[in-house]
Structure formats: structure tokens, C-alpha cells
Image: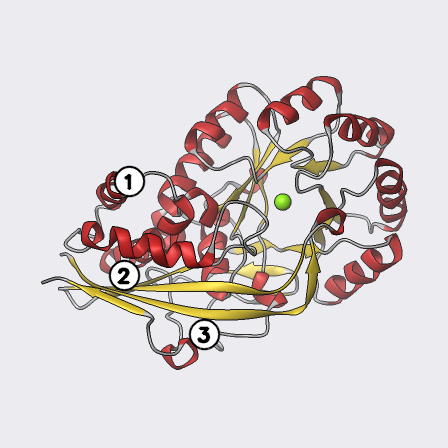
Amino acid sequence: MKITRISVYQTDLPLAEPYWLSGGRLKFEALDATFVKLETDAGVTGWGEGTPWGHTYVPAHGPGIRAGIETMAPAILGQDPRRLEALERAMDACLPGHLYAKAPVDFAAWDISGQVQGMSLAAMLGGVEGDPGTRIVSSVSSGTPEEVYARIERFRAQGNRAHSVKVGGNAEADIARIRYLEERRLPEEQILYDVNRAWSRREAMLVMQATAGLGVTFEQPCESLDDIAAVRAVTSAPIAVDESLVTVQDAARVAREGIAEVVDIKLNRVGGLTRARRMRDIALAHGQQIYAMATGCTVMADAEAAALAQSVPESHRLGCWACQDMITVDVAPGRGPRNTGGLLRIGEAPGLGFAPDEDVLGPPLAVYSEG
Ligand code: MG
């Protein structure tokens, strides 16, 4: 079997409401999504999505995905999509780095592989453990304590009982914000305080020490792994990393050096399921708990992330995301995993289990084929 055609689509995904990253640093209103369709000489077709969380957040660029695929197309065409590592090496040889541009191609190859084997993505990743629904973590935009709490209440109304709240203003305001929200947190409800790299080492130490008795977890408190390691050494609060988790080498370092207790694997950032699976295994081998999420997306990348989450034992699975609930475009109405009472429940159909409506995507921006 070989890949004979690559079609690349672009769609803007407007957010239902404007989003402010931690500290109110960045505001954006739409996501730039790329969809990739791989066709094969066996008549099996696979789909993958690449949607960065805006282009100001981390080094990931919507148009860069399309440019990367244009460069890699000759190396992708002719590959057997079932040989996932060979495809990965072919892309790496053609274009080192640029993992976010490779993710949608990797996802589409997994989709084809699953269809050929008659296995869902989760089954290919090792199987579903327990209920096939993963707890959805709401992404709660930054604001005053009252504004943030109002947003949490709206997510609660959808059934969500886990929230990633963006903090990262000045230290005093963050201490007050965290105390305010913790006083109002429901029993069994989980709040992750996501700093999105906004604190200096000093600010991180101040906030994390002042709130130590509350037992809360902080995500990506500072810019780099060096910064987080320095903070880790002098604070007791659990730490999660996501922006600094890009390569498999990052995952190995975070695990071996004890920099974080939790990894938040963003599938698009790390290059897709092939690499995300390795990070999952490194984390599990080192007693770390795991979130699995896209970087922003429709139901398609939500489904890919939920499949990885379901392959994590329940004891170590913290949650996934439903970015689809934050956008106003649905590329696969009525299909794929949806928010049901705060859970994203995956199906058993082979591969991804569904395809987007090409009418919604519009005509492809580019098509690459052999010959
Ligand atoms: Mg985060």
C-alpha cells in the first residue's frame, strides 16, 4: 500500500468568544486550521488536522503547516501509511523539526492504518481501559476572579468538572485569584492553574509558596525547563508542563530530572500520535500523570487526543479537552466524540472513525500526487 495523493484544506475556526491567554497577554478570535487528506492505491483514505492555538502562543504557524507539507510532499508520496515510523523518518529526513507541521500527516496515516487493521486509534494505542469517556478539562480564559468564576460556571452547566484556569498576572493578584476560586471549587472538581510561561522564577516561587496549603497544581509556570527545574527545587506544589514538552528528549528530561509530576501532551505540538505514544510511555514509566490534548481544533483533533487519553490507565489519566465547544464551525456534524456530561467518549469504529464534510472545508488549497 502506498500514499498516492495528499490534499490540503484550510478553514478558519472562529472562537465563540474572544480568548485571552494568561495574564491577558494575548487575545485572538479565530484559529487557522489545516486539514490533510491522504489517499492510497488501496482506496483507503485518512484524515488529520493541524490547528495551532494562534501564531503568537508558541512556535507553530497555520500557514507554516501548509508550507511544510508542500516541502515534505515528495517524501510522503509513495510511503506505506501503515509503516508509521518509516513515514516519520521520511518526513524528518526531508524537513528536520517543524513537528507541528508533521502532526496532521501522522494522524492521517494512523487513520488509514486503523481502517486497514479494523482497529480504532485507541485500540492501536493499546486499548481502552474502563469507560471510554475521558474527563474534559475546560480552557478558562484569563480575567478578574469574578469573570473567571462566571466562565467556570458556564462550563459546569455543560457538565465539565475539570478546568484549566489561565493565571499569570502579577503575583499578588494571582494569589488572590487562586484563593477566590479554590473557596468556590466544588467537591471532586479539579482546577489546574495554567500560567502559560507568564511568571518569572521569583513570581512563581512567591505564588506557589503562598498557595502551597491549597494542594493545587500549576501548569508551565515559567518560560523554560531550566526555569521550571529551578522553581521545582524550592516549591512543593505539583507542576505540569506543556509548552516545554515538544520533543521526546524533553519528555525524557522532565521525567528523569523530576521537573514535573504531570505531563500535558499536546499531540499537534509533539508531531502526532507516533511521538505522543512514546511520551506517554516515558511518563508512565516514571509515575507521571497525563493530560492528552490538541493545541486547538475541531472534533477531529479532539478525537485523536481522546484516543491517546483512553490508552492511559485510569490511575494516570487526568483528562483531555474539547476545543470543539469553543468554536463556531463543525466540520463533521453529528459525528465523532462530543461533550456528554463533561466526558469525551470515543467510539470503536476503525481508525479515526469519521471524516469531515468536504463541503464545509471547501476546495483544497493544494493537491500533491505521484507522477
Ligand atoms: Mg497549558
Q: Earlier in the sequence, mark 1 or mark 2?
A: 1
Label 1 SS: helix
Per the model, the C-alpha gap separating discs 2 and 3 is: 18 Å
Image quadrant for the C terminus?
bottom left
Q: Tell me the residue at 49%/77% (across/down).
A: 334
Q: Give the quarter of the image for residue 288.
A: top right
- Relative side of 51 to 38, left or right: right
Whether label 1 lies within 8 Å of ligand 1 gets the answer: no
Q: Which labelled disc corresponds to residue 148? A: none
**Residue wearing tag 1:** 92
User: Are the residues flagged by discs 2 and 3 in contact, CB closer than 8 Å?
Assistant: no
Percent coordinates x, y for residue 205 in the rendering: 78, 26
- Relative side of 295 to 326, left or right: left
Look at the image and name its color scheme.
secondary structure
Q: Tell me the residue at 48%/37% (across/down).
A: 246
Per the model, the C-alpha gap separating discs 3 and 1 is: 31 Å
- Relative side of 174 to 69, left or right: right
- Asked if 321 appears above or below 326 in the picture, the reply is above
Q: Earlier in the sequence, mark 2 or mark 3?
A: 2
Q: Pick the residue in front: 241 or 189.
A: 241
**Residue wearing tag 3:** 332
Q: Which labelled disc corresponds to residue 115? A: 2
User: Are the residues flagged by discs 3 and 1 in contact, CB closer than 8 Å?
Assistant: no
* Numbered circles on residues, count: 3
- Look at label 3 and name its amino acid: Ala
Q: Tell me the residue at 48%/49% (across/down).
A: 60
